[in-house]
Image (tube, grey):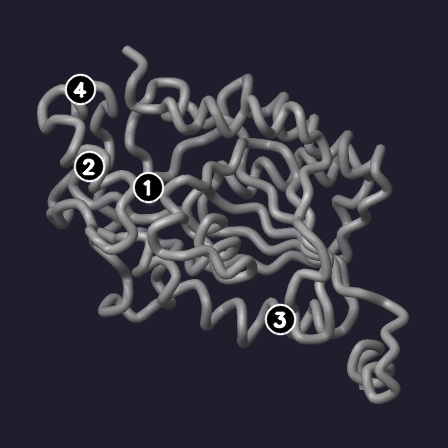
Amino acid sequence: MSLLRSTSINHHISIMPKLVLVRHGQSEWNEKNLFTGWVDVRLSAVGEKEAARAGELLKEKNVHPDILYTSKLSRAIQTANIALSVSDRLWIPVKRSWRLNERHYGALQGKDKAETLEKYGEEKFTTWRRSFDVPPPVIEDDSPFSQKGDARYKDVDPNVLPQTESLALVIDRLLPYWQDVIAKDLLDGKTVMIAAHGNSLRALVKHLEGISDADIAKLNIPTGIPLVFELDENLKPTKPSYYLDPEAAAAGAAAVAAQGKKK
């Protein structure tokens, strides 16, 4: 029986589960201001430094992950590996799932954000990028930015792999993995680190904090700064989540919010 389950019988929990969320550092396509989604790009030099800073923060603040979860995308995997190497935790077990992937941006994948904004206008651009339940146009199978036939998804039913997604659809594919897999490690009292993406992490934060469909559009998660949740035996936050570097997180979130407007 887990520590949490055994101690909760007496309404006393000796080890509270801790969840650490890390959005990948700047990628090569973040640097170019392109819609990325499921396209597998790597970290930029800036992103590598951000990942190293994440590791420094974990070490400085004595946050010690016991197990790592990542998406199937290289930028998240690189971020986790660099951060854990810097924090001397590269040895911990790892689980990866497509369900932690970034939101699939459909036909927008590979397109310049500023050019898309100029071409389609503020309303449609914002709807595609930030609305809760309106996905972009579907990507064609013959697009160079399609994941059709990608070996990393060969064991996944092709009928469930997306060709575009809204945030609502990201939540639909993420929550079963959260409830069936990740939750078990948390309920065993482990400190779980998830290295993933802006929208998959927004989906999880929405679930944990009960953020409304309307208000989630305002949430921006900065790159490379660990966000910590302390949870109870029902995996509900016991206090507000916190960044390990609050000032840098505020500046990073503002930069994320401004994406698309830069030339």
Residue type at tag 4: Glu
Residue wearing tag 3: 183
Residue wearing tag 1: 37
Q: Is residue 261 visible?
A: yes
**Which residue is at a point 79% across and 45% down the rendered structure image?**
89
Secondary structure of residue under mark 1? loop
Which of pointers 4 and 1 lies earlier in the amino acid sequence?
A: 1
Q: CA distance from mark 2 to mark 1?
A: 9 Å
Q: Nearer the viewer, mark 4 or mark 1?
A: 4
Which of pointers 3 and 1 lies earlier in the amino acid sequence?
A: 1
**Which residue is at a point 34% across and 51% down the rendered structure image?**
214
Residue type at tag 3: Ala
**Which residue is at a point 84% across and 77% down the rendered structure image?**
3
Q: Is residue 67 visible?
A: no
Quarter of the figure with residue 114: top left
Query: Around disc 4, counting alpha carbons within 10 Å, would you say few (fewer than 14), some (14 to 19), or many (20 or more)?
Result: some
Which of pointers 2 and 1 lies earlier in the amino acid sequence?
A: 1
Are the residues flagged by discs 4 and 1 in contact, CB closer than 8 Å? no
Q: Nearer the viewer, mark 3 or mark 1?
A: 3
Which of pointers 3 and 4 lies earlier in the amino acid sequence?
A: 4
Residue wearing tag 2: 108
Are the residues flagged by discs 4 and 2 in contact, CB closer than 8 Å? no
Q: Quadrant of the C terminus?
A: top left
Are the residues flagged by discs 2 and 1 in contact, CB closer than 8 Å? yes
**Which residue is at a point 43% across and 60% down the rendered structure image?**
99
Residue type at tag 2: Leu
* Left or right of residue 218: residue 126: left
Q: Quadrant of the N terminus?
A: bottom right
How far from the left and from the top, in percent, is residue 100? 46, 55
How far from the left and from the top, in percent, is residue 156? 35, 67
Residue wearing tag 4: 115
* Left or right of residue 229: residue 180: left
